[in-house]
Amino acid sequence: MARSKHILLILVCLIVPLIASAAQTWWIKVEWDTNFEKDLVGYRVYHRKAGQPYPYPDGHLGEVDRSRTNCTIKGLEPAVDHFFAITAFDNEELESGLSDELRFRPGSNGGDGDGGCFIGALLI
């Protein structure tokens, strides 16, 4: 994967609450455009909560195979800012820079969890 290559990502969030015990938790679905580079292995998804330093002190949440262009992150704590970013990596473990951050606070719309958001991001 050429380091100077740009990858355009489209992040889409679908926010729906899940009821677990008496507490309300949320999930988010993140989607992006396919990267067509031949040596692409997959994507890494990063998450941090407000108050945690940038960039992502706990590393990535997981890896998504190159054949998929979305993932679902469950168990988001309500009324806390959550930040997400994505990178692409190749078969030599070269990783692109982080995408722009997506910021989301579950429950901040005051509704029933049917809100959503959309953001375009550019990986360098």
Image (cartoon, rainbow, N blue to C red):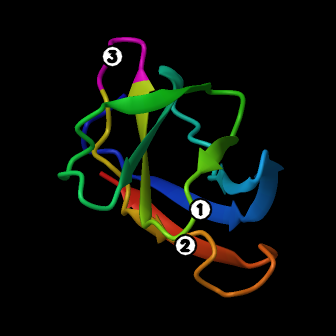
Give the main secondary structure of the magenta stretch: loop
Residue bearing the label numbered 1: 10
Secondary structure under tag 3 reads loop
Residue 78 shown left or right of residue 88 in the figure: right
Residue at 74 percent of width and 79 percent of height: 115
Quarter of the image where one finds residue 65: top right
Q: Amino acid at mark 3?
A: Glu
Q: Nearer the viewer, residue 90 or 119?
A: 119
In-image side of 117 versus 77 (left or right)? right
Q: CA distance from mark 2 to mark 3?
A: 27 Å
List the single residue furthest toward the bottom.
Answer: 110
Q: Residues within 10 Å of mark 2 (few under 14, many from 20)?
A: some
Magenta-colored stretch includes residue 91: yes
Tell me the crowding category of disc 1: few under 14, some 14 to 19, or many 20 or more residues within 10 angstroms, Cα based. some
Q: For residue 118, what is the image quadrant?
A: bottom right
Horizontal side of 1 relative to 62 (left or right) equals left
Task: Name which residue lies at 76% across and 53% down.
Answer: 22
Q: Earlier in the sequence, mark 3 or mark 1?
A: 1
Dot 1: what SS?
strand
Magenta-tinted stretch: 90-94
Residue 21 location (% of width, % of height)? 78, 45
Question: Tag on residue 119?
Answer: 2
- Magenta stretch: residue 20 in it? no
